[in-house]
């Protein structure tokens, strides 16, 4: 009798446990996290792990750039599995729907890779533009570590370079050596370095001084950049500006505008305190052009400026290139094209390609909502694959399709442009 009672009690306990498990699963399905499976090539959202919108917004922007995806695909196999290059590649593939994953996705492995590289992500509000440079710096370091070890000067002396005094700069590798090179021979190190290529964000800006007294010009200096940080100047400093807003082309024009530099020694006329004009331009533009609009100013205290900046879908960069400026190849009418905003997606690209060499197509817009201390980052981005011509609004886990018109009305904090290839299709890039 006792044995029967014990057996009955055990069955009741098992039945109760089974019912409890079923009930818990039902509650999780109905009211738990809204994880779902997305179809391939559709954009996935990202879980906010606590003030990580700055990370999520940048990942969405990078995932929208085909040249970034191509570069990561080429380099991720030559790095360790725990490297930032590999983890970033895997994360961006998931966001683009090319890897099966739950939606929204948790980028925990990417955060672990950043921490493994010594980067500390402090709790609280962070800046997406600062994180962009952290990622770019880390990717470059990993790329350099993946190259064969340099044992002698003969390993690296072949290839394009600039010589000033006794400094040799290898353009594509970013390595500086103190030596004088007289003879060049092909090396396996240089071939591999050239094959890997620079980061897709890496470009070269140029600067040069010209004496106002004797017109003597200094040596042309090159500087590497990963993003263009454009300031919002006072309205009066930009003649002809349309009232109420700036254009992106005006800000770039202000960035490269000549400036007077005082008390500079001139090697031409020998004067020690001459006034010289400093001119800026671009010697080489990256495949993925990242533009940062600096909206923080100082007026007794830090303030955020919310001035509207209009930007084009197709950006013409020819007017700002060093070679074009020197050769004066652009007419007044051609320069004015750089001020236009092409937003209908059906612009006359074939005719533009005949006139311009540096055409860039918009792929992502990062927006910061809120004030200087507290706020939220969101991204407007293109889709991937067959969805490339579609635009999406992403805010952490939220993803919805939007029109191009809504994208062009956004208050941009960062803009990502991809260099157009020579083919006629706008979304074919090199």
Image (cartoon, rainbow, N blue to C red):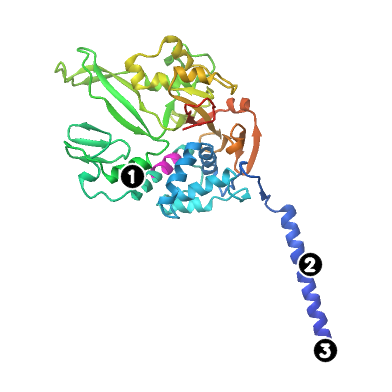
Residue at 34% across / 46% down in the picture? 144
Q: Residue furthest right?
A: 1
Q: Is residue 416 above or below residue 157?
A: above
The magenta stretch spans residue 197:
no
In the structure shown, which secondary structural element does the residue marked by tag 1 occupy?
A: helix
Residue 195 coordinates in the image, percent (x, y)? 36, 41
Label 3 and label 1: CA atoms lie apart by: 81 Å
* Nearer-N-terminus badge (2/3): 3
Q: Residues within 10 Å of mark 2 (few under 14, many from 20)?
A: few
Looking at the rendering, the stretch of residues picked out in magenta corresponds to: 130-137
Residue matched to label 1: 192
**Viewer can see residue 370:** no
Q: Is residue 84 placed above or below 182 in the rendered structure?
A: below
Tag nearer the camera, 2 or 1: 1
Nearer the viewer's eye, disc 3 or disc 1? 1
Disc 2/disc 3 C-alpha distance (Å): 26 Å
Q: Which residue occupies the foreground of this view, 158 or 392?
A: 158
The tag earlier along the polypeptide, 3 or 1, is: 3
- 3D distance between C-alphas at marks 2 and 1: 63 Å
Disc 2 versus disc 3: nearer the observer:
2
Query: Please, what secondary structure does the residue beneath circle 3 have?
Result: helix
Query: What type of secondary structure mainly makes up the magenta span?
Result: helix
Q: Which mark is residue 2?
A: 3
Tell me if 250 is positioned left or right of 60 in this view.
left
Q: Position of residue 150 (x, y in %)?
A: 25, 48
Mark 1: give few (<14), some (14-19) or many (20+) Cα within 10 Å. Answer: few
Rendered image: mark on residue 358: none
Residue 267: x %, y % from top left: 16, 20
How many numbered discs? 3
- Residue at 56% x, 48% y is 50
Res 19 label: 2
């Amino acid at each position: 009798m006792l044995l029967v009672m014990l057996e009955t009690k055990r069955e009741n306990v098992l039945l109760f446990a089974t019912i409890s498990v079923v009930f818990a699963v039902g509650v999780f399905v109905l009211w738990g996290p809204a994880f779902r499976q997305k179809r391939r090539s559709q954009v996935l959202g990202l879980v906010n792990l606590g003030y990580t919108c700055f990370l999520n917004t940048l990942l969405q922007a990078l995932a929208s750039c085909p040249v970034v995806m191509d570069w990561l695909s080429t380099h991720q196999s030559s790095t360790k599995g725990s490297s930032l290059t590999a983890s970033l590649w895997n994360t961006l593939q998931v966001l683009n729907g090319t890897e099966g994953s739950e939606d929204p996705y948790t980028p925990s492995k990417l955060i672990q890779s950043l921490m493994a590289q010594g980067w500390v992500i402090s709790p609280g509000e962070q800046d997406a533009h600062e994180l962009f440079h952290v990622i770019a710096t880390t990717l470059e370091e990993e790329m350099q570590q993946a190259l064969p070890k340099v044992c002698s000067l003969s390993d690296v002396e072949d290839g394009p370079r600039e010589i000033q005094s006794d400094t040799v700069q290898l353009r594509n590798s970013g390595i500086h050596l103190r030596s004088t090179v007289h003879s060049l021979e092909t090396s396996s190190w240089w071939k591999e370095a050239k094959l890997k290529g620079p980061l897709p964000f890496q470009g070269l800006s140029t600067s040069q001084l010209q004496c106002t007294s004797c017109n003597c010009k200094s040596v042309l200096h090159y500087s590497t950049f990963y993003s263009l940080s454009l300031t919002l100047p006072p309205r009066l400093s930009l003649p002809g500006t349309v009232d109420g807003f700036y254009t992106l082309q005006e800000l770039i024009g202000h960035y490269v505008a000549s400036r007077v530099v005082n008390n500079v020694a001139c090697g031409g006329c020998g004067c020690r305190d001459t006034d010289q004009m400093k001119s800026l331009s671009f010697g080489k533009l990256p495949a993925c052009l990242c533009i940062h609009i600096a909206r923080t100013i100082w007026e007794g205290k830090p303030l955020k400026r919310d001035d509207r900046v209009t930007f084009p879908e197709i950006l013409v960069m020819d007017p700002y290139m060093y070679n074009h400026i020197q050769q004066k190849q652009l007419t007044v009418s051609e320069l004015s094209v750089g001020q236009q905003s092409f937003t209908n997606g059906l612009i006359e690209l074939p005719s533009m390609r005949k006139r311009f060499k540096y055409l860039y197509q918009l792929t992502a817009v990062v927006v910061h909502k809120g004030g200087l201390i507290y706020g939220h980052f969101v991204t407007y981005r293109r889709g991937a694959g067959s969805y490339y011509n579609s635009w999406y609004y992403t805010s952490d886990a939220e993803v919805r399709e939007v029109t191009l018109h809504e994208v062009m009305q956004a208050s941009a904090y960062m803009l990502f442009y991809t260099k157009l290839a020579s083919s006629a299709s706008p979304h074919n890039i090199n």
